[in-house]
Amino acid sequence: MAERPARKPRKARTAQVIRTERLTPHMQRVVLGGDGLADFSADTCTDHYVKLLFPAEGVTYPEPFDMERIRAEFPREQWPVTRTYTVRDWDPEHRELTLDFVLHGDEGLAGPWSVRVRPGETVRFMGPGGAYAPDASADWHLLAGDESALPAIARALEALPEGAVAHAFVEVAGPEEEQKIDSDVEVVWLHRGDRPVGEALVEAVRALRFPEGRVHAFVHGEAGCVKELRRLLRVEHAIPREQLSISGYWRLGHNEDGWQASKREWNARVEAEQEGAAPAA
């Protein structure tokens, strides 16, 4: 058996906060810059993401910052905590990386940080990752998600060529959470109100009269909602897997650490359940 190639060390990048902005009552923007972004690039996928590194409370790491060294020398509970965020925009000319954060009051780690962080502060992160960009050869596009998927959906809409056929659905708490997107596509904003997360989104996509032709779909958000939409697309509409980018960004009742620890098993179980019921492509 051939030996598995050694894992390539993951390099942490360093940036500085340039500015912050409150976009809506529950969405905060943080723009990063600095020389640490000199060789950074995030212009091939519209769902590029980075993993922000938050120091464990009371822990100081040796310089230069090295995640491999930290993992080797520090106990696990002292490793930096990671939180994953989609790249809302990347401006290579000005070396500005824009990230948008959903706010849940004082709950969570990254949301409260995004509100209190100030220009000049240092931020470390890993990445970028990413896998999706709208397929220009598709006959039409479906984009659906909640607030967590809004940055990626907005970036995808702004990347679509003029005249592209697309249906975009975004579920948010209320009208005050809608955002301006630089696209000719009319976004259907679904106001959640007191309804369970994802309920309005599933109803809207289910009610859509699917156009003829090959669709390329991007569906992300709360895991339970995404599970229902995956069944709709794969089983009821028989859309091949390769035409779908679909995954739970988060799950009710779980923080990111808990969700990431169980995500692989959850996805495998959902796929096994639904692929058995899906018609052959």
Image (spheres, helix red, strand yellow):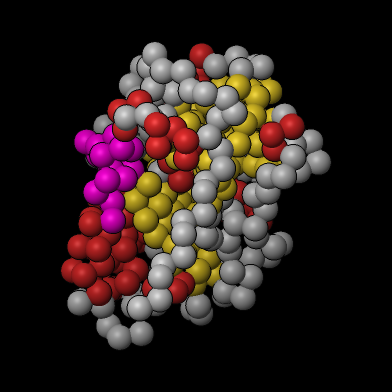
Q: Which residue is drawn at 39% across and 22% down?
A: 56
Q: Quadrant of residue 277?
A: bottom left
Q: Which residue is drawn at 32% across and 29% down?
A: 75
Query: Which percent across, then down, holds residue 105?
Result: 37, 19
Specify whether 273 is left or right of 157.
left
Query: Which percent across, then down, holds residue 148?
Result: 43, 41
Is residue 258 part of the magenta span, yes or no?
Answer: yes
User: Looking at the image, which residue sits at the far right?
Assistant: 93
Q: How many marks?
A: 0
Is residue 174 part of the magenta span, yes or no?
Answer: no
- The one of 151 and 177 positioned closer to us in this rendering: 151
Residue 228 visible at all: no
Part of the protein shown in magenta: 250-264
Residue 137 visible at all: yes
Q: Which residue is drawn at 25% across and 67% down?
A: 271
Q: Quadrant of the N terminus?
A: bottom left
